[in-house]
Image (spheres, grey):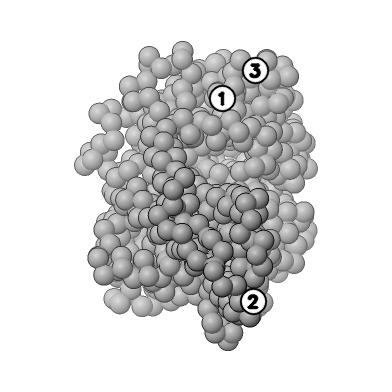
Amino acid sequence: MKRYTHLSDTYSTTALRLVVLLLFLQLGRWWFYLYNRDLLGAIPFGELLTIAWGGLRFDLAAAVLLTLPWLLLRILPFDFVYGRRYTLLTDTLYAFGGSAGLVANLCDTPYYRFTGMRTQALHLSEIFQDEATADVLGAHLRSHAGLALAGAGFIALFLFVAFRFRAVPPARRRMQRRCTAAVVALAAIFFAMRGSFDFRVHPLQLTDAHAYCSANNRTALVLNTPFSVLRTVGKDFSLKPYAFFTPEELAARRPDRHTASGTVTARGARTDAGSDADARTKKDDTALRAEVAAGNDATAKTTAGTEAVAGEARFTRRNVVQIILEGCGDTFIGALNPFAAEEPIADLSLTPFLDSLAAQSLLFTDFYTHLRKSSAGITAILGGIPAYSPFLYMLSPYRDNEVETLASLLGDEGYASAFFCGCNKGSFAFAGMSEAFGYDRFFDRTDYEAIHGGGDYDGQWGIFDHAMAAHLLHELNTMPEPFLVSWFTLNTHNPFTIPEAYRAAVRSPRGTMHGTVEYIDRVLRDFFAAASREPWFARTLFVITADHGHAAGRPLYDNPAQLNRIPLLLYTPDGSIAARRSDRVGGQIDIAPTILDALHYPKPWFSLGSSLLNEIGGGTCLFDDQTDLRWVEGDRMLRIDKERLTPIALYDHRRDPLLTTDLAPREPERVARMLDGARALLQDQRARLIENRLKSDE
């Protein structure tokens, strides 16, 4: 192939090819921005220039890391670097490294819409645990075929431009000059990887991106994916302890034990550390607890097993069925969508069955995920351990800690337990997670296909939800009572596949989140209709929630307040838990304490969360929106810098859902109190993980 330029030495050619790679990394950045502009917002031109300039530091470091073998081989001061076979070897190394980096950038462009951050090595290790990773990636390629074709053209253009440059031996071969050039090049490579000439500062890190943008969510635009991945390979995910409070101060702020009749400290004294928002709803919550206690006491005599007394209420030993909906945030559930009248996503509700069930349930309307990742959501729900990026419990050094969970506590009282998910073997470390959290068994796609064959495989994530629901019903009919069963659904996830038999009944376009929400609503309708005919149904507490929310592509829904809000409903067929709507704030770590409280569990237990039925604790939530932390307390939401743990802004998230008006200057005392609440939770969580204290001492 004819080249544009035949350069006189290998050093100039190497530098020019590196510049070509930098150019295409920069072009990938603007592709990323245009694709995700609705999430990143309109950025002033001046800031775009600053982002481009700052991004060059990260691009240079990434380019050198990606092509390091090629660089080291090309700068050698010997004649054989111009040989044909040697040139072919080094060209291959350059093409592979450069293309891999650009492909990573391109793949992360749509994936960012699900994660809200650049992919890191930890995320890749989680993805590749799934034995059907190839199927999942293939499905994503098919669902983004246009983007994949454009990406292939982008890579082809990169290689075409890069290989227009070629080195030829110089006419005068001065070894001294070539050795000097090699040393200079080696020094340049070192400083490019380090990202700085100043040895007094640390090498370039992901957090340095904050210096080049005005909003934390725009750090993803400053960074590039290969840098994000390579900088986190082998990273130690051990947690460093916080020291905002003394142990005595922390003990006063954070309850050590919980009971079904209230919260007690390690010394057995009742504590009232609730916020002003909690106080405003205390009377209402007291009435709610009275309703639950009265209903449970009336039905306890008809439930299986013996009864134990805790306070004035009896341990009911009800069955518990948890249904965790993949990605189904409040936005997609008609009974919980606060903006349906203003900007409807569909002409009619996507979830008529869930809406009808919510009307017969205790429904929490201000409930949150802690981190918008499935593995984090399941860990918080089943294990009571919140995750704040980049920490993921099952990939951390603390995954073998002793943990007190809903399954282990109820198991001690004679409950049989099982966790069902039709996922591929290895997905999200669920098998190990279920064992660590005390479940008797875990049931996945492999187990399903051993019984029913492979006809219900959806082609990427696992078993279709309707098929899994039918099998779950069979399992529930054969399990001894009382039982705890958790079921995590799958199909409300990109590429949003719906089985042929259900497509005619779905109004939303094929391949959309909305369509699969309609599908899962019908699956739940059929499941409850069949379950209602079984004898165990009336003796069961049903809990429906989600692992995280999902973007809807509209600013009204895709802001931190709404995007991280998920459902929580408690339904008892006999009406022992009265139907009502509660705006009490809560998060996923509050689910297990709420269930134990509803059952009137007879012994004290440990939890980082609080029962939402308890008029003393609860009423708050700390979640990670991928760029900042958010502490929610009543109608206020405090935005907190994730690195410094300092306040950024305070919002009235109910009256100001787009979070546009900062109330912090007018409410400094409230900001300080809310910040203390968030810091106390984080310090408590880290200390207990590090010291292996995630269970009650009694």
Q: Residues within 10 Å of mark 2 (few under 14, many from 20)?
A: few
Which residue position holds label 2?
175
Q: Earlier in the sequence, mark 3 or mark 1?
A: 3
Which residue position holds label 3?
454
Q: Position of residue 197 (x, y in %)?
A: 54, 82
- Residue drawn at x 69%, y 57% is 396
Q: Residues within 10 Å of mark 1 (few under 14, many from 20)?
A: some
Q: Position of residue 67 (x, y in %)?
A: 58, 59
Q: Earlier in the sequence, mark 1 or mark 2?
A: 2
Which residue position holds label 1?
459
Give the total of numbered labels: 3
Q: Amino acid at mark 2?
A: Met
User: Depth check: 419 or 578 in front?
Assistant: 419
Q: Residue furthest front?
A: 171
313 vs 18, left or right, is right
Element type where label 3 sits in the image: loop
Q: The C terminus appears in which quarter of the rendering?
A: bottom right
Element type where label 1 sits in the image: loop
Q: CA distance from mark 3 to mark 1?
A: 10 Å
Q: Amino acid at mark 3?
A: Gly
